[in-house]
Image (tube, grey):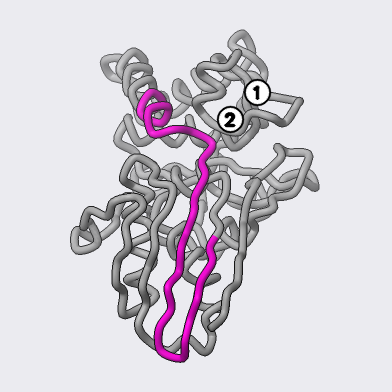
Amino acid sequence: MKIIRSAFKGWFRGIAAAAAAAAWIAAPVQASAASEPAAAAAVYAAGGAYAAGSFEEAASIVYGVMKQAYGTSVTVNYTGDTSDLAKQLDKLFKQVGSKDDYMRFVLKKMSWSWTSTRNQASITFKMEYWETAEQSEYVRKTAKEAVDSLVKPGMTDRQLVKAIHDWVIGRFAYDYSLSSHSAYDGLAKGGSTVCQGYALMTQRMLEAAGFDSRIVYGDSKGSKHVWNLVKLGDSWLHLDTTLDEGGAAKPGTAYLLVSDDAISKDHSWVRSEYPAARG
């Protein structure tokens, strides 16, 4: 019998600090989370125990619990080879993170413990979040209302993305205390949050406007950072609402709808994990 505990927490402490949860943040994320297959849409209740015959099935169970109003715990009873269990659980953690960009960055901490024999393991996962389910729903509702107010007759996609970019900059202020990490914090707690909150809000607004979009994890100016990608027509382009911050009266545009080459002057990321933005 073996018992091990592992924890990943504290995604960022803003632009000025590194991420502690690099294992998930660095996960391969080619597929957007919104495309989770219908076959994986079974309902899993928080606090329940479920059987899994593969680590892919186990990842779907954990993700399913998280999708149910940000479930905070689940036990997976796995049957199969457990000889490399620690490595497989690291992979499972990354698989869960690759399913949903918003949830990937609203997760504050995931920890797990297990007992095992050669062919079986009982693994208990526990999760904490930067937002409650109700707060995330408030973000989604606010994003939809804001986008509806921004859409004008004859507006092009580029104009709508710029309007979203400017709205986020006008509504949010950067939290230099590095204590607020969510979109909800930016909306309801004095209007301040770190880059994580900016990118989460931008993501929800781009989704509300019907755009394919991603949240990008990487580095900027020597610090860990997140920003967004959006698809316009057949092309992907970057936008960084945090670094274009200038207030409602003077939002910047240096990082609005730019290519990989343009933004790579002071941003870096694992390009193979995201769509290419060629401009």
Determine whether, in the image, residue 256 is placed left or right of residue 135. right
Q: Position of residue 49 (x, y in %)?
A: 32, 63
**Mark 1 residue element:** loop
Instruction: Tell me if label 2 and label 1 are in contact, CB under 8 Å.
Output: yes
Q: Residues within 10 Å of mark 1 (few under 14, many from 20)?
A: many
What residue type is disc 2 on? Thr
Q: Position of residue 77 (x, y in %)?
A: 36, 73
- Foreground: 2 or 94? 2
Q: Residues within 10 Å of mark 2 (few under 14, many from 20)?
A: many
What residue type is disc 1 on? Glu
Which residue is the site of mark 2? 241
- Tell whether position 144 is magenta: no
43 is higher (above) or lower (below) than 196: below
Q: Position of residue 270 (x, y in %)?
A: 61, 61
Q: Position of residue 15 (x, y in %)?
A: 73, 38
Determine whether, in the image, residue 194 is placed left or right of residue 273. right
Determine whether, in the image, residue 68 is placed left or right of residue 194. left
Q: Is residue 20 visible?
A: yes
- Foreground: 135 or 81? 81
Give how far apart the Cα atoms at labels 2 and 1 are.
6 Å
The residue depicted at 71 percent of the width and 47 percent of the height is 224
Q: Which residues are magenta?
A: 112-139
Which residue is the site of mark 1? 245
Q: Which circle marks residue 139 in the picture? A: none
- Foreground: 40 or 222? 40
Res 163 → quadrant: top left
The residue depicted at 65 percent of the width and 46 percent of the height is 10
- Tell whether position 115 is magenta: yes
The residue depicted at 33 percent of the width and 17 percent of the height is 145
The residue depicted at 22 percent of the width and 56 percent of the height is 41
110 is higher (above) or lower (below) than 231: below
